[in-house]
Amino acid sequence: MSFANATALSATELLYKGTDFSSLSCLERQWAAWYIWIGNPIIATGLMSFLLHEVVYFGRCVPWIIIDAIPYFHKWKLQPNKVPTPKEQWECTKQVLFSHFTIELPAIWLFHPLAESVGMSTWQVPFPTWKAVLPQVFFFFVFEDFFHFVAHQALHTGILYKHIHKLHHKYSAPFGLAAEYAHPAEVFILGFGTLAGPILYCVFARDLHILTVYIWIVLRLFQAIDAHSGYDFPWSLQHIIPFWSGADHHDFHHMAFTNNFSTSFRWWDHICGTDNLYREYKKKLRAAKTSMKGASKAQLEAAEKALQDEFEEEGIKAEAAVGAKAKVQ
Ligand SMILES: [Zn+2]
Ligand SMILES: [Zn+2]
């Protein structure tokens, strides 16, 4: 990249005037080259954000689609009798793609002006150090988790459930692609929790690079898709970090319609007692497995299914009660 002829510099190239490119890393040079190539920072950020979201979302769903197609993995499925069919997955993909292009694309486009208005760095290089990035990302996780815990409970009441959140509860046994299967209003409400953390942080600290926001969004997408995967492996993160929610936590929310309202961590549901039925279910499941020592695999599966049916039936009643309540409001 040559900046020798100052008269021929484009507006975007001028942004980098005086930058010592030899001191930058390969990724930082590519970042600057992207902004110079596109020639308009708003379009460059919008396009990069949208592509990142699409590539990471569908890219992360691919391993789960493959796992669903291989019966060997079904022994780790939380609701083993409910493996999604390819048709169900395709129907879900179409709905998710429709909302990505009609709702998320315009919203992502507005993110660059909003980010710049609060002083967030976008086209700038060099990038912040890992020492700066890690605590920021941790703060975004904690903030989003609490926001989601509160907003998700609100979405389970009256008209908010009936007209908005009901769509996301179409699948009582979720799968990766269903993570963003939701009403546009829900995408906005819960998406606010994902983006408000970085924006608030930037308003107060005035020191945040959009790359940190991208790292956060990639991790958040991984969290959301994995939580909807329907699989609990012995090596899943919740077995390494005990306060991590994971699929085990959120799958119960879809199955029983209640409990476990937070996203990444278990602590708010635990403190507020909104995991009481989940803990009762786990206790009953453990007790059944202990009392049935020596039973065949089929007998164990039948006992697990009977217990799941019991909690799901209670969930259907609870959902009907919310629906009935919504009618009289
Ligand atoms: Zn819900
Ligand atoms: Zn969900």
Image (cartoon, grey):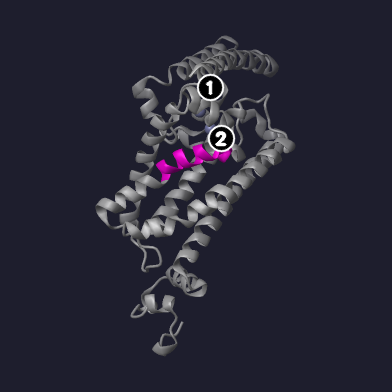
Q: Judge whether 287 appears above or below 185 on screen.
A: above
Q: Is residue 243 visible?
A: no
Q: Write the start and end of the magenta stretch as one range.
A: 179-194
Where is residue 17 shown, x and y percent of the image?
A: 36, 80
Q: Is residue 33 left or right of residue 300?
A: left
- Label 2 sits on what residue type? His
How packed is label 1: few (under 14 Cα within 10 Å), some, or many (20 or more)?
Answer: many
Q: Is residue 186 magenta?
A: yes
Residue at 69% x, 34% y is 72
**Residue 306: which quarter of the image?**
top right
Q: Are marks 1 and 2 in contact (CB under 8 Å)?
A: no
Residue at 60% x, 37% y is 178
Where is residue 183 shown, x and y percent of the image?
A: 55, 37
Numbered badge on residue 228:
2
- For this orientation, the residue located farthest to the top is 291
Secondary structure, mark 2, is helix
Q: Is the CB of mark 1 within 8 Å of ligand 1?
A: yes
Where is residue 170 shown, x and y percent of the image?
A: 61, 29
Q: Judge whether 55 appears above or below 93 on screen.
A: below
Q: What residue did someone put label 1 on?
A: 257
Assign the magenta stretch its main secondary structure.
helix
Task: Name the residue nearer the viewer: 239 or 130.
Answer: 130
- Label 1 sits on what residue type? Phe
Residue at 41% x, 21% y is 274
